[in-house]
Image (spheres, rainbow, N blue to C red):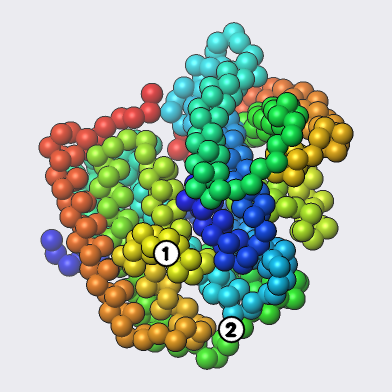
Amino acid sequence: MAVNTILRTVKQAIWLGWKIDTNWANPLVFAIYYLVRPLASLLIVGFIFLIGSLASPSGVFDPQYFAYMFVGNCFFVYVTHVMMSMSILIHEDRVHYEVLKHIYLSPASLKWYILGRALNGVLNASTSLILTLGFGLLIFQGLLGVQIPINWLGIDFPLLALSLIIGMFCFLALGFMLCGINIMTSRVQFMLTEYVSGTLYLFGGVVFLPEILPSWGQTISNALPITYFLKSIRFAILHQTSFDAQTNIAYLVLTTVGAIILGIGVFKIAEYKARRDGLIDRKEEY
Amino acid sequence: MLTLSAYVYLYKMLNAPAEFASFVIIGGTMVAFWSNVLWNMSAQFYWEKETGSLEVYLVAPISRMAILLGMALGGIVNTTLRAAVILIAGTLIFQVPFMLQEPFTALLMFFLTIIALYALGMLFASLFMLYGREAWHTANLLQEPVYLLSGLYFPVNYLPFIIQILASLIPLTFGLDGIRRVIILGESITDTWLNVAVLVVFILVLLPFAKFALNYMENLGKKEGRLTLRWQ
């Protein structure tokens, strides 16, 4: 496939995804919708943290650990957005809008089209992240007086950017795996996303240190790229863990390569079987 | 169950008292019902419209409330099974403490909460009937914020006063508070009568209001020709 065709497919898919996500409302309403859910999720964990600390026998509030939770929860938005946008895409295009078969009739390739739609999910997640970080700081630090020890000038931006890029490859790969499963199945798109993102949330060290998990849970945590992704992000922003950043990046790359092999492999097999078994234009809604 | 477990571990990490884990388990159990109210009851007419079958419902000589009531009963059965699994698994895995003294009060509180929630769902259904893609976003919008406001994972009395005022507009807040007080803190009907009274008021207000709203929105939809619009 010519590079030009690939680029055009990706660009048009990003644009289409953006239109589907945004053109039902004016930009302000859209921004509110994209802020409220992740912000509420952050506030839930923040209040659990504050109330739990207050009710503990020592009654001590640990700002370093609060910052750990704050950053982890904010950046987890990439997982939820990318997974959700890629998981519901097949259902939306095949059943709801009935256009999946038309993609095969066009010069575009399905995988590049999916990549474009997923990149739109990354853009949306970035919008959510910026809004959530800003409003989260405003509420916790500004209104509730909680000190969050983040030195914005001391952020290691190259490490942050590198972690984000590798992390995106990983989440896109996992998203392709979900697309593959959704092509082969029907009506599991929401459940599937919930289970996968729930597993990553529990075992990925998003809001608590994975060391508190039972040993089998720690083993799962060590095998997940999200664990290393969040460690790197936290190291870049908070500098609070005394670990070897290079080794962590190496683990992140290693687990991401594993995720890419798994994700693309599952997608290719599923797509082949779906075309063979006539599932590309299957109807589910009746 | 997975997210709920993460919150239990967070409380454990903070050395919070054991009943906070019980709060999370009970809250997580009620999440199943709220999700069902939101995605099945409230959004039901939207899904039907998108699949082209809403007009079939409207042609039939039956009450819209009856359709929704049937859907609610079906949804409650399925959701109760899911909620029971969350409750039993959460209790066994995390060994959370309960001090249930009056099981009938707990059941009364539970059923009143469910009726009030599904009445709210019927009210939302009237809105969702006319919605296009915003139905999906609205349902999303009403998920985590309601988890936050109704104190699904922590007691609401710790929240700032202004948030408590907002929370009191949601029947789930009172229901969940009552259920927790009876099951976790071992309180009786005499301690929780206010919760029962508020839930009854919610039911008495929401059910007729839902009926009115359904009729109004259906007529509006007919006037504007929006009941059969798909892919908006």
At a point 83% along the width and 58% down the height, the residue shown is B161
Element at label 2: loop
| N-terminal label among 1 and 2 | 2
Residue A166: x percent and y percent? Answer: 32, 73
At a point 27% along the width and 53% down the height, the residue shown is A177
Element at label 1: loop
Q: Which residue occupies the foreground of this view, A219 or A250?
A: A219
Q: Tell me the subunit letter for badge 2.
A: A
Q: Which residue occupies the foreground of this view, B175 or A87?
A: B175
**Which quadrant of the figure has residue A222?**
bottom left
Relative to A63, B86 lies left or right: left
- Mark 1 residue type: Gly
- Mark 2 residue type: Ile
Relative to B231, A101 lies left or right: left
Residue A147: x percent and y percent? Answer: 68, 80
Residue with the most extreme top position:
B61
Residue B205: x percent and y percent? Answer: 80, 29
At a point 53% along the width and 17% down the height, the residue shown is B57
Q: Provide the residue designation for mark 1.
A: A204
Q: Which residue occupies the foreground of this view, A118 or A247?
A: A247
**Which quadrant of the figure has residue A142?**
bottom right
Relative to B87, B198 lies left or right: right
Q: Provide the residue designation for mark 2.
A: A150
- In this rendering, the answer to whether B53 lies above or below A221 is above
At a point 47% along the width and 51% down the height, the residue shown is B2
Numbered label attached to residue B66? none
Question: Mark 1 against mark 2, which lies toward the viewer?
Answer: 1
**Which quadrant of the figure has residue A39?**
bottom right
Q: Tell me the subunit letter for badge 1.
A: A
Q: Residues within 10 Å of mark 2 (few under 14, many from 20)?
A: some
